[in-house]
Image: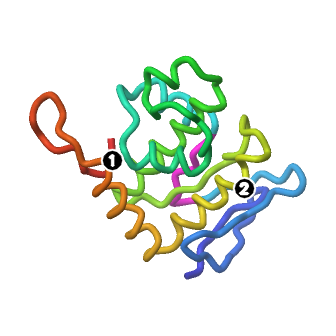
Amino acid sequence: MTETIIVNGEPHQIEAKRATLVFNAGGDRIQYPGRVMITAEMSLNRYREIDEIDQFAAAMFEMVIPDFGRQVCKAELDQCSDGLQQLAGLLSLTVWLLSRKHSIGWSYPESGLHPKYQANLADVIIMLTDGEAIGKFVRRVAANTCRVDKSGHGNADIGG
């Protein structure tokens, strides 16, 4: 599919796939009409606004930080660095927007992450772009984390 991006005020056509990486190698101003570009600030704001981390964002967080060693929840993450809170917010906002059929992009998603976790974040990006992989992920997470909350309702919906 062809998509238009704006580079320094000039429209350019690119061949867009489910995941299209655009690297800004120099101080170009790049805009993505029709996409919600998730920034670090938006991610941290999302984290601060939500009451809890949804199960899909939590599972992706564990893919990125497999040695976190604690439950991926607000109570634990509130004690962590802004970088980890930003990651949780990025993943939560991603799940929320994708579940509502929005086109998204990430702006510097690796900021605040230790380099050893940046490659794991790339694995999440790859998974999100593969329809079969995301389907397997959703089924696995829903099967493994479907639980009953205090109201007695299941908690297996995507979004937040």
x then y, percent, for residue 30: 73, 55
62 above or below 31?
Answer: above
Q: Name the residue under label 2.
A: 119
Identify the amino acid type marked 1: Gly
Q: What residue lies at 55% left-to-right and 36% top-to-bottom?
A: 43
Please tell me whether mark 1 sits on a helix, a strand or a loop: loop
Residue 1 on the magenta segment: no
Q: What residue type is labelled 2?
A: Ala
- Location of residue 29 in the rendering, given as x and y in whole percent from the top left corner: 77, 51
Based on the picture, tell me whether residue 35 belongs to the magenta stretch: yes
Could you say which is closer to the camera, residue 153 or residue 2?
Answer: 153
Q: Residue furthest top?
A: 79
| 19 relative position to 24: left or right | left
Question: Dot 1: few (<14), some (14–19), or many (≥20) neighbours within 10 Å?
Answer: some
Q: Which of 111 and 14 is in front in this view?
A: 111
**Residue beneath disc 1:** 159
52 sits left or right of 77 in the view: left
Residue 37 image offset from top left, x and y in percent: 58, 49
